[in-house]
Image (cartoon, rainbow, N blue to C red):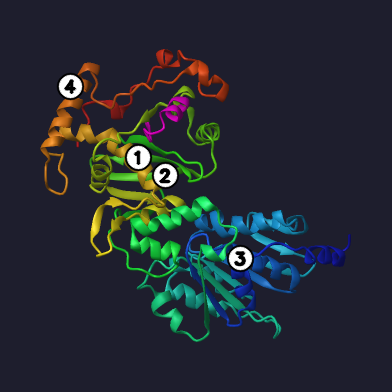
Amino acid sequence: MNTEQVAQEIKTRQVPVTIVYDKNARATKPIILNEGGADSSKSYSIAQLLVQKFKNEYNKTFLITRKTLPSLKLTAYKLIIDILKDYGHYAYLKHNKSDRTLYYRAHNNLMVFLSIDDPEKIKSTEFNYIWMEEAGEFTWDDYLILKLRNRKKTIEKEPNTMFMSLNPVDELGWINQELKKDTNVEVIHSTYKDNPFAQLADIDVLEGLKIQDESYYRIYTLGLYAKLKGMIHEIIEVDKVPKIEAPITIYGLDFGFVNPSVLLKLEIDIKLMAIYITELIYESGLTNTDLIDRMRAVVPVEDRQDEFYADSAEPARIEEIYQAEFNCLPSDKGKKSVWNGIDFLNRFTIYSLKDNVQTNSDFRSYKRKVDKNGHVLEDPVKYNDHAPNAARYALYTHLWERMIDMVPGWVWHRGMQKEEDKVEKEAKDAKTAQQGKNGPVRVSVDVDIAATKAKGIGDNKDKDEKKEKPKRESDDDSWVI
C-alpha cells in the first residue's frame, strides 16, 4: 500500500461522535473554550477532532499540552494514542516515545505532547493547532505565550485554532474573569446530557450531588461556575520525598471497581508533623486479584510487612490481600472517625509528589457539604474523595490512639473534648492491654477459606500462624513526638 492509499484508507473511516464534537468542528473563532460538567465528552470530542485533522490536513503541527508532564501522560496523551489505536490509525504513524511526538509522513503532520511547566520550552516553535487540556491549571502568562506560538503558516480554509477544555471550578480565575471578555473566544458549554454514551452509574453519581452540595452540583453536573466553600485539606506539591530521620511508613488503601482503587504510601516525619504522600495505584476496573498484582508490582517484598490500612467495610478483600502476604489491616471507621480523621490529618503538613496527578486532584477538590443557605456542614462531599479517604484510613488508624497516649489532651475536636470519646478510649485501652501491644491490633475476619478458594481468596489458612512481622523502628514505643 503506497502513501496515497494509506491516506485514503485512513480518511474513509467513520466513528460515532457527540454534538460536542459537531459544535467544535463548526466553530469559527480562533479560540474555542469548552466549559462543562463531568462526562460531557468535551475532552474526548476535542481529541477526536484533532485526530481527524491530523489525518486529513497537510503540513500541520499540533501541540497537546497540560501544565505538568505526569498529568499530560495520564490524560490527553493517553487518550489520543488510545483513539488512534482504536481507529486503526496508529500503525501508520511514527511514534517517538522519548520525545512524545507522532509523525504522519503521508501528510507531513507532526503532533507534539508537551507540558508547559516551563513556557520557555515552546518559545522557538510555532503551531497550527493547540489543545490546552484542563486549561484552568495554566496561568494567564502561559496562555499568552501559547497564543503567540499559534501562528504557523496555514491556508485560509484551515485557520489556526486554540482549543481549551476545563470544568468551571474557579469562578474568580483568569478564564472566567478575563478570557471570556475576548470577542475572539467561542464558548461551548456541555453536560453529560450532551453525551449519549455516558454511563448510567456515572449519571446517578452526578445527579446525586444535588442533595450533597450545591457548588459541586453546579460545577460537575450543570457545568457552571460556583464559589467553593468548605475546602478540607491543603497540600503542598514537591518534587521528591526528603530524607526523614526515623520515618514512620504506612499505606492507605481505598477499594473501588467502577470508582478507582487507590493505594498511597505515607512517609511521616513525626517530629515535624509532616506527611509525604506517594501515589502507587489509582486505577478503576480492578478486581481484587488485579489489585494484588498491581500491589506486588509497586511494593517491594521487604516492605509488605508495613501496615496497609484498608476500608473496613470490605473484610473479605482485606483478608485476601493479607493471605497474599501483605500486612493488610482494617481501618478504624467507627463513630465520628471521618470527622476526627479529617481533623487529625489537618494537624499535619501534607506534602504530595507532583507526579501524584490523580491524588492531588482529589485533595484539591475535597470539600465539605454546603446547604442551600450557604452553611458549611461537617460531612464531606462523597465525590472524588478516594485519595483523601486512603490517606485518612492510614494516618488515623495507625497514629490516633498513639497520639492520645503520648500527648495529653490530644482528643480534641473543634476545641471540645467529648466525654463519649473518653469512654470509647477507655474501652479500647482495655482491649489493647489484653493484647500487650501499643500499636493497632489486627482484627481477625471471619472468612470461610475453604468456601472461597474457588474464588481465589486465600490458599493457605495457616499463613497467619506462620507469618512473623519484623520489628520496625516505627513500632518502638520510644519514639518521641
Secondary structure of residue under mark 3: helix
Any magenta on residue 313? yes
Specify the label residue 278 is tagged with: 2
How would you rate the neighbour count of disc 1 (Cα within 10 Å): few for under 14, some for 14-19, many for 20 or more?
many
> Does the CB distance between marks 1 and 2 fall below 8 Å?
yes
Three-letter residue code for mark 4: Ala
Three-letter residue code for mark 2: Thr
Specify the label residue 45 is tagged with: 3
| Mark positioned earlier in the residue sequence (4 or 1) | 1
Name the mark nearer the viewer: 4 or 2: 4
Looking at the rendering, the stretch of residues picked out in magenta corresponds to 306-321
Q: Is residue 206 above or below residue 133?
A: above
Q: How far apart are marks 1 and 2 (CA)?
A: 8 Å
How would you rate the neighbour count of disc 4 (Cα within 10 Å): few for under 14, some for 14-19, many for 20 or more?
few
Q: How far apart are marks 3 and 1 (CA)?
A: 40 Å
Q: Distance between the residues labelled 4 and 3?
A: 60 Å
Quarter occupied by residue 5: bottom right
Q: Distance between the residues labelled 3 and 2?
A: 32 Å
Specify whether 249 is left or right of 95.
left
Specify the label residue 430 is tagged with: 4
Specify the label residue 437 is tagged with: none
> Does the CB distance between marks 4 and 2 fall below 8 Å?
no
Residue 334 in percent (x, y) is at 27, 35
Residue 89 in percent (x, y) is at 75, 58
Name the residue at 62% across, 64% down: 47
Q: Which residue carries the number 1 mark?
A: 267
- Location of the N terminus by quadrant is bottom right
Quarter occupied by residue 207: bottom left
> Does the CB distance between marks 4 and 3 fall below 8 Å?
no
